[in-house]
Amino acid sequence: MRIGHQRLVVVGALSFVLGGCASLTPQPLSVHEIASVSAVDRQQAHHDVEPLKGPLSLDEAIARAIKYNLDRRTRLMEEAIAQGMLDVGKYDMLPKLVASAGYRDRNNDLVTRSTDSVTGLPSLSNPYISSDRVAATTDLSFTWSLLDFGQSYYASKQNADRVLIAGEQRRKALHNLIQDVEIAFWRTASAQKLHDEVKSTIHAAEDALADSRKAEAERLRNPLDALRYQRQLLESLRLLEAVDQDLSTAHIELAALVNLPLSQDFKVVEPGDTVSDKWQNVPVDKMEELAIANNADLRMSFYKARIAQEETRRVMLKMFPGLSFSYSTNHSNDSYLIHQNWTEAAAQISFNLLGLLSAPEQMRLAKAGVALADQQRMTTQMAVLTQVHVARLQYGNALRQFERADAIWKVDEGIAQQVANREQAHTLTRLDSVASQTAAILSLLRRYQALAQAQAAAGKLQATLGLEPNVTASNVPLSKLTQAVGTTLRQWNNGQLQLAAGNK
């Protein structure tokens, strides 16, 4: 009866496992599940985001991006995971303390025979039983391996460098984020500035086009002159509509970067100081010094070189014999045992002799990895120094282009005002007014585009130098973060370049 019960249990367990494996089929998500999860994600994305209470300044836009940008939150989580892996890896250096318990149940007795060691004949004594059918065992064992400790030690040092690499990746992402925010901010500012003027000029051009077509239909003007007139109006309309379409998405891009609702209508306020030429007064050798000490890519290359060096030590450690120690306390309720409680201690040394065959290749591979990391570090350093010189020149060129675009806009704005006055005095046609107003709008657009390019060039130079707002953490209040960003931006505009707080 006991045997039948055990077989029934085994058969039932096998049937359950096999049936469960056979029932595994792909389960696609339903539309309702996708919609519900997406709704929760959208709500979570704006969780704890402080609402915008007024116009958005450049300082606050950068501060909001630092505090609320979703990509930046992802980088922070990646850095936290790298730190967690380091914390978990430290426990691998500890000895292993394992507690185990076991249970066995036989369907018959463990009956054994013996053979005479001299004659080789079966012993005349009857077969004997040496253990109970049912027995439970427990043990607590302590094991420590010197080789495993060494491997875990160097692995922890590598994980520590990976934490630092994750921090540099976060810094690099922050530099790119600040550049994107500045470009999107100035595009939004230009869209806000040009929106009303573009709409009114388009309306005036459409009215003039309708009047021209009406005059052409009534034969009040020469048909060729009317068509030329309409051609110029249509060209102005095409340019104005292209400007309107180009700027229509600017506020959405800025809202996504600072994690505001995409449908929210907000205004931006331009800072008083747009661009500065103080950067041109900073010696290039100081910029090189800052870049070498603070550039995120270069710092990552140093950490990767250290990881390669630690890998060489790990490979060398594998060539040493493994030495391990163990101690355990044991218990069994088997009634045939004279001593049901006992302790064991052991020491073991092992050496993989065949592993010596691959040791030279492993060492060559490890040294090649170190050489590659050193070469990458040198290459990155030269690339960073090149970027410093190029970014410095690009900023100077962008600054001059902005000054030129600003001067052209002021001239076109004056021409448009003069033409508008003459149109009111009926000395010029509406076409002249539309054309001059269109030229002024395009000049203003080019001014903002040049301003955005100058800000992008400044951001590129700042990123190459490894500069970032002097903020130690993103969990500070938004008001204090905005103040810190504003202070840093003013320092940059004044040419005051210094290391970030975390890298001094």
Image (cartoon, rainbow, N blue to C red):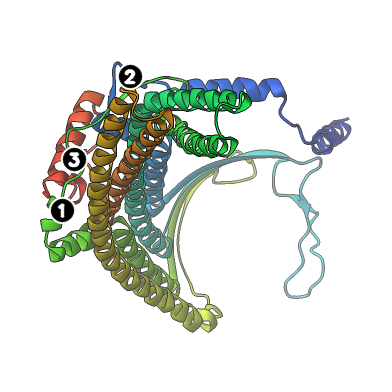
In the image, residue 500 above or below residue 235: below
Give the mark nearest the N terminus, 2 or 3.
2
Return the x and y of residue 164 as percentages of the image width and height.
32, 52
| Secondary structure state at the residue bearing disc 1 | helix
Crowding at mark 1 (Cα within 10 Å: few <14, some 14-19, many 20+)? many
Return the x and y of residue 301 as percentages of the image width and height.
34, 64
Q: Which mark is residue 325?
A: none
Per the image, the residue denoted by label 2 is: 52
Give the residue drawn at x 23%, y 53%. Answer: 400
Q: Quadrant of the N terminus?
A: top right
Of 406 and 279, nearer the camera is 406
Of 427 and 9, nearer the camera is 427
Q: Amino acid at mark 2?
A: Leu
Q: Label 2 to label 3, Cα distance in Å?
A: 21 Å
Q: Label 3 to label 1, Cα distance in Å?
A: 12 Å
167 left or right of 124? Answer: left
| Secondary structure state at the residue bearing disc 2 | loop
Per the image, the residue denoted by label 1 is: 279
84 left or right of 231? Answer: left
Give the mark nearest the N terminus, 3 or 1.
1
Per the image, the residue denoted by label 3 is: 489
Q: Can residue 85 be seen at all in this image of the molecule?
A: yes
Q: Amino acid at mark 1?
A: Trp
Of 163 and 210, nearer the camera is 210
Q: Can residue 475 be seen at all in this image of the molecule?
A: no
Quarter occupied by residue 461 = bottom left
> How many numbered tags mark residues here?
3
Return the x and y of residue 243 as percentages of the image width and height.
45, 36
Crowding at mark 2 (Cα within 10 Å: few <14, some 14-19, many 20+)? few
Q: Amino acid at mark 3?
A: Leu
Crowding at mark 3 (Cα within 10 Å: few <14, some 14-19, many 20+)? some
Q: Label 2 to label 1, Cα distance in Å?
A: 33 Å
